[in-house]
Amino acid sequence: MAAKVLQISTDNITYVNVPGSGGEWSVEGEAINDTILGATFDSALTGLLQWSIKTDGIFKGFAGYLAKIKKGGTPVATTAEGMTLVSGKIFKITNAAKNLWSRTASYTIKDNAVNRNAELLWVDFLHGRVEFKGSYTVAGPVTADITYIPTSTLGKASSYSLTMTADPVDKTDFATAQGNSGHRVFQPGLRSVSLELGGFYDATVDLRATLIARTEVIIEIDPVGDGSSIARGYFRLMSDNASGDVGALESETATFALNVPDTALLYLPFSWQHSSTTLNVAIQNAIKSWQDELSTYYVRYLPQGAIGQVPNDGIRGQFVATNVSLSGGLSNMNVFTLELMGVGAYTVV
């Protein structure tokens, strides 16, 4: 029997398998009541359709115990740090140990030793990157006078759940629905991020004081512990619960919500960066679709493992990523949860 696959593509040409253990495709029609006078049974007509795909995605090759959860520490000022071209007019700080910057401290980005802050399009404080405006020509070398933030382990976590979701915004109109056989069309809406950490209670960490002070915390999630794929964001602690049985260690569960600062030129308040990572490309593209609010990527669901089977039971279509959450633990793999909402009609393949 052919092996079932689920694939993601950025261009509807090259598709990459999602490393999941199972997948689900569903299509639902809204029930429009058309019961009329004299009827003794309730009647319904199928209205607009919407479809979605769900699957998991395993970060292959790395056991869950390798994950590192870190917090930002005491800022350190530095000058004349070299920056390397990434692509286009995006530059990143060369020293990876200094790629988390304080957004509250002053900074100066220089091109050929001249302050060019006025020519910046955005600043990625979380990953040490900048982009110059399209109208500006970079001469080089590019250097940075910044204040970076070292990181250290956050508490004594043994499990984590990073929830990354987006609201699908329905933008269907009469003409669109009439042209696509009555399928709803969505675009990405408000994104939400939260983090739950479970582990052993450690009085020296004193998360309760953090909660009382409403302190902003920069948190880094490194699923495989080698810095190849990391997520960082600005968070605030929302709850801290401790419990335990007699004679057992006290356990603690802390829940953080994303805090979006009002900072000029801020790139994003939460984002992922990959560097020489082995994270599956399909999952990377799902993250990018969610992070960049894209609705132009494609998903393909093939129950028989290939297109053109008899009968044709595979489907293909564009999607909005409504969920790309990640969880892991000491005795588990790092596993993503993908939920993709279809945009318009799907194609049978």
Image: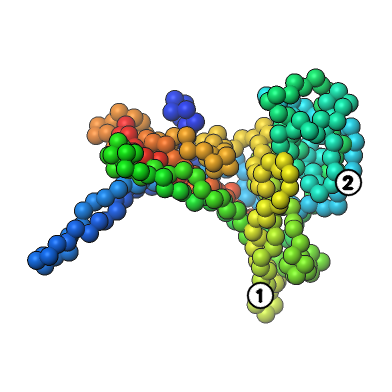
Residue at image point 69% right, 77% down = 247
Which secondary structure, mark 1? Answer: loop
Q: In which quarter of the image is the C terminus?
A: top left
Q: Mark 1 points at which residue?
A: 244
Q: How far apart are marks 1 and 2 (CA)?
A: 39 Å
Which secondary structure, mark 2? Answer: strand
Q: Mark 2 points at which residue?
A: 76
Where does residue 153 sit, x and y in percent of width and height?
A: 77, 54
Crowdedness near tag 2: few (<14), some (14–19) or many (≥20) residues, C-alpha within 10 Å: some
Q: Nearer the viewer, residue 213 or 245?
A: 213
Residue at image point 21% right, 53% down = 45
Front tag of 1 and 2: 2
Picture layout, residue 254 above or below residue 95: below
Where does residue 178 sit, x and y in percent of width and height?
A: 28, 39
Crowdedness near tag 1: few (<14), some (14–19) or many (≥20) residues, C-alpha within 10 Å: few
Q: Nearer the viewer, residue 131 or 17?
A: 131
- In which quarter of the view is residue 242 placed? bottom right
- In which quarter of the view is residue 275 placed? top right
> Is 11 on the left-hand or right-hand side of 218?
left
Q: Which amino acid does label 1 sit on?
A: Gly
> Is 39 on the left-hand or right-hand side of 114?
left
> Is 315 on the left-hand or right-hand side of 86?
left
Q: Which amino acid does label 2 sit on?
A: Val
Residue at image point 66% right, 44% down = 268
- The total number of labels drawn is 2
Picture layout, residue 101 above or below residue 210: above
